[in-house]
């Protein structure tokens, strides 16, 4: 098979130029910049130049150290085809530097200019329903179109030639929030090439996809439809994997333009969207230097555990500290009712980000554009150009980051427990939910919440991550499993690890086909037990046993023990007849390790008791004991230094006793044995050396 030109070129250049080093526990690779940064998204192109200095002075007064600029400014950077204008950006960066503010440059490819898409309409994305996107919003481009790749490469290259050695540019953001795929001719053609490369012959594809079902049998690769829903589950899974590979090559296309012209200290990243499952983040991050995400509260109220999980997820993309590239200055404009964070919660969220491994928190946005789709979004300045109330809270964050940054520099969060996030499995379940309430992210969070509360640190990792350093590894639903994954999991248990498998684990193979054995498939013999049958639930079912009395809902599996040393932990009570009296959770000891299988989605209290037992068995201790509910404990360390970040997410004052005297880093200087945290209060403390 012939590789598309852009793909072959990108891979070649990437091999030639390598990548920038990842960041180690500091915001940038530039020693003259502060280690912990507060920032804002700034759009100088939207304002008269005469206003810039005033804006930057107000930023400096708020202790803002970094601005992200450029990511939607294509029509200003290249007003007509091939005519580049960076002089305004040179001046904006120089003026920012005068105010001690450094810059992350966004490539503007999420918003192509009108001249481009009008002259070359094939660069416009085609929606799943066949409609072509139009100019006027953003993200209207085709991620597979070779001509769009060429324009994206050219603008990124011109920017890099211009700014790649600017000492005030610390990094690059590619595009903005990758997300929308293309279903048009270029995507179809490349999907077919991708499938041909993977399967070799159409006969092989037909066999692995079992296309005799409903006469789906194909004679040629180019007959295969391009669909994201309502299709053969093998096709759907391959479509997602293809989309992931395309976003990776989309990244490489721009990386190959930037890297040869850029100071190796300038990192290259993109800004991601938490649990968004449009593509596999681990695939895309394999070619990025650091991870960064946009932290927005997408429900009506800030749920700190849910938000913390998304930080941990992002940290897991590179297993390193990360950036919060965007977050809300109290509210957004895109929810049905855009309730604000409470006063104090913006600061609470900033410190939570740092507690989970962020070294930069950037607010979106500095000031609302004079017009445009986002006029109601939260900002730091009002339409009159003077601060709105949240400016002062962010100013406090800036002051505190500056005070504590030098001590926090070099430290990172560390965890003895891990949760596995697997895109193939999440996709496979979402394609065939079977029980409407079975949202794989909600299920993941049901495992995460008690783990985070009790262990006070959790890594969210990919199935490829080495497991040796963990005492407890939980796989909430590893639905798609290969023999090699099963082998690694068994080796982990044999070496003394504690493994927890959740419902729906080990049901599918890598083609999204049913495993030839009962669940958990290749782990069933090792577990000494199996799933006899699964049942979708719409009412509570009683459960009881080692984790106390509780209920299960949404999903329940009738388990069977097949080995004398496999023990039943939980049993169903009276239910649908099938489940009555049957095992709901089983476990087996293997040397010093254990493998435990939980076949049901338990209520929160039962999950909490289960977690306590597992942590105890695995020998995992919390950082602090007797912490009031709603007070989050985060520790960052470098092996020598130990920094505690305590965040009171409650609207009431809370008292926390410390196990040893600690030094205050953001409050009145001094050493304390306990802290009283006001509502949404934060303490940042360092253990005395
Ligand atoms: C993000 C996006 C920003 C801005 C923001 C508003 O998803 O990257 O450009 O639109 O949302 O909340």
Image (cartoon, helix red, strand yellow):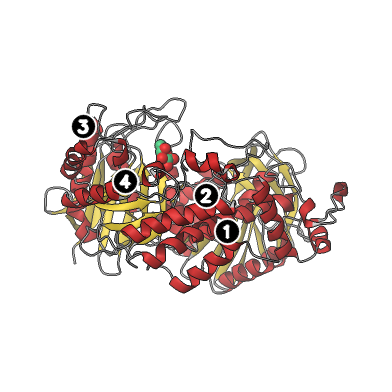
Using the numbered discs, state the Cα–Cα distance from disc 1 to disc 2 in whole angstroms: 10 Å
Mark linked to residue 99: none
Residue marked by disc 2:
447
Question: Along the polypeptide, which appears first: circle 1 or circle 2?
Answer: 2
Q: Can residue 161 be seen?
A: yes
Query: Is label 3 or label 1 in front?
Result: 3
Residue marked by disc 4:
362
Left or right of 555? Residue 376 is left
Question: Along the polypeptide, which appears first: circle 4 or circle 2?
Answer: 4
Please provide percent x and percent y for residue 603.
56, 41
Using the numbered discs, state the Cα–Cα distance from disc 3 to disc 1 in whole angstroms: 50 Å
Q: Quadrant of residue 551 in the image?
A: top right
Q: Residues within 10 Å of mark 2 (few under 14, many from 20)?
A: many
Name the residue located 26 percent from the left edge and 59 percent from the top edge. Answer: 643
Q: Are marks 4 and 1 in contact (CB under 8 Å)?
A: no
Residue marked by disc 1:
500
Question: Along the polypeptide, which appears first: circle 3 or circle 4?
Answer: 4
Query: Is label 4 or label 1 in front?
Result: 4
Residue marked by disc 3:
387
Instruction: Looking at the picture, tell me which residue is in the foreground, 15 or 354.
Output: 15
Query: Is label 4 or label 2 in front?
Result: 4
Left or right of 358? Residue 438 is right
Q: Are marks 1 and 2 in contact (CB under 8 Å)?
A: yes
Question: Along the polypeptide, which appears first: circle 3 or circle 1?
Answer: 3
Q: Are marks 3 and 4 in contact (CB under 8 Å)?
A: no
Q: Is residue 384 above or below residue 450?
A: above
Quarter holding the N terminus? bottom right
Q: Is residue 187 above or below residue 677?
A: below
């Amino acid at each position: 098979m012939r590789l598309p030109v852009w793909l072959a070129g990108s891979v070649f250049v990437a091999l030639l130029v390598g990548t920038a080093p990842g960041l180690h526990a500091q915001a940038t690779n530039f020693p003259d910049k502060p280690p912990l940064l507060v920032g804002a998204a700034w759009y100088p192109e939207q304002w008269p130049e005469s206003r810039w200095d005033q804006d930057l002075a107000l930023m400096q007064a708020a202790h803002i150290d970094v601005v992200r600029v450029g990511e939607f400014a294509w029509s200003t950077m290249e007003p007509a085809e091939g005519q580049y204008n960076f002089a305004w950006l040179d001046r904006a960066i120089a003026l920012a530097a005068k105010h001690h503010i450094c810059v992350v440059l966004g490539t503007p490819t999420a918003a192509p200019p009108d001249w481009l898409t009008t002259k070359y309409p094939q660069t416009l994305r085609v929606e799943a329903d066949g409609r072509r996107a139009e100019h006027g919003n953003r993200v209207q481009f085709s991620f597979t179109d070779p001509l769009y790749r060429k324009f994206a490469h050219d603008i990124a290259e011109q920017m890099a030639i211009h700014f790649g050695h600017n000492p005030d540019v610390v990094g690059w953001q590619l595009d903005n929030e990758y997300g929308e795929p293309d279903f048009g001719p270029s995507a179809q053609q490349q999907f077919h090439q991708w499938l041909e490369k993977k399967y070799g012959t159409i006969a092989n594809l037909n066999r692995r996809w079992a296309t005799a079902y409903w006469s789906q049998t194909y004679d040629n690769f180019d007959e295969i439809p391009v669909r994201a829903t309502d299709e053969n589950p093998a096709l759907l899974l391959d479509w997602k994997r293809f989309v992931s590979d395309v976003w990776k090559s989309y990244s490489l296309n721009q990386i190959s333009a930037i890297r040869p012209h850029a100071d190796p200290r300038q990192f290259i990243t993109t800004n991601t969207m938490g649990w968004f499952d449009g593509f596999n983040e681990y695939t895309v991050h394999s070619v990025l230097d650091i991870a960064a995400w946009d932290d927005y509260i997408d429900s009506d109220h800030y749920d700190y555990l849910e938000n913390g999980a998304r930080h941990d997820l992002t940290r897991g993309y590179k297993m390193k500290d990360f950036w919060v590239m965007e977050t809300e200055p109290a509210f957004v404009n895109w929810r049905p009712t855009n309730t604000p964070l409470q006063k104090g919660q913006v600061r609470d969220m900033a410190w939570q980000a740092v507690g989970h491994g962020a070294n930069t928190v950037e607010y979106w946005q500095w000031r609302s554009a004079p017009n445009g789709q986002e006029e109601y979004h939260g900002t730091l300045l009002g339409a009159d150009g003077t601060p709105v109330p949240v400016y002062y809270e962010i100013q406090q964050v800036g002051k505190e980051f500056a005070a504590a940054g030098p001590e926090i520099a070099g430290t990172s969060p560390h965890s003895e427990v891990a949760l596995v996030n697997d895109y193939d499995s999440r996709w496979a379940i979402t394609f065939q939910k079977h029980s409407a309430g079975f949202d794989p992210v909600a299920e993941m969070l049901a495992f995460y919440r008690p783990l985070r509360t009790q262990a006070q640190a959790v890594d969210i990792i990919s199935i490829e991550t080495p497991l040796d350093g963990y005492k407890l590894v939980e796989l909430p639903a590893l639905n798609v499993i290969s023999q090699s994954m099963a082998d690694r999991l068994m080796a982990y248990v044999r070496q003394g690890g504690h493994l927890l498998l959740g419902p729906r684990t080990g049901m599918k193979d890598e083609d999204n086909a049913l495993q030839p054995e009962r669940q958990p498939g290749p782990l069933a013999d090792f577990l000494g037990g199996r799933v006899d049958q699964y049942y979708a639930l719409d009412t509570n079912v009683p459960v009881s046993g080692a984790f106390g009395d509780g209920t299960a809902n949404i999903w329940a599996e009738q388990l069977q023990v097949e080995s004398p040393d496999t023990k039943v932990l939980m049993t169903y009570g009276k239910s649908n007849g099938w489940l009555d009296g049957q095992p709901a959770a089983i476990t087996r000891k293997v040397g010093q390790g254990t493998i435990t299988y939980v076949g049901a989605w338990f209520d929160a209290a039962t999950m909490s008791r289960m977690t306590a037992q597992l942590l105890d068995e695995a020998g995992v201790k919390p950082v602090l004991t007797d912490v009031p509910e709603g007070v989050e404990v985060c520790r960052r360390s470098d092996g020598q230094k130990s920094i505690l970040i305590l965040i009171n997410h409650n609207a009431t004052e809370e008292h926390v006793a410390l196990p040893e005297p600690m030094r205050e880093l953001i409050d009145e200087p001094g050493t304390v044995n306990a802290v009283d945290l006001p509502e949404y209060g934060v303490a940042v403390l360092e253990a005395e050396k």
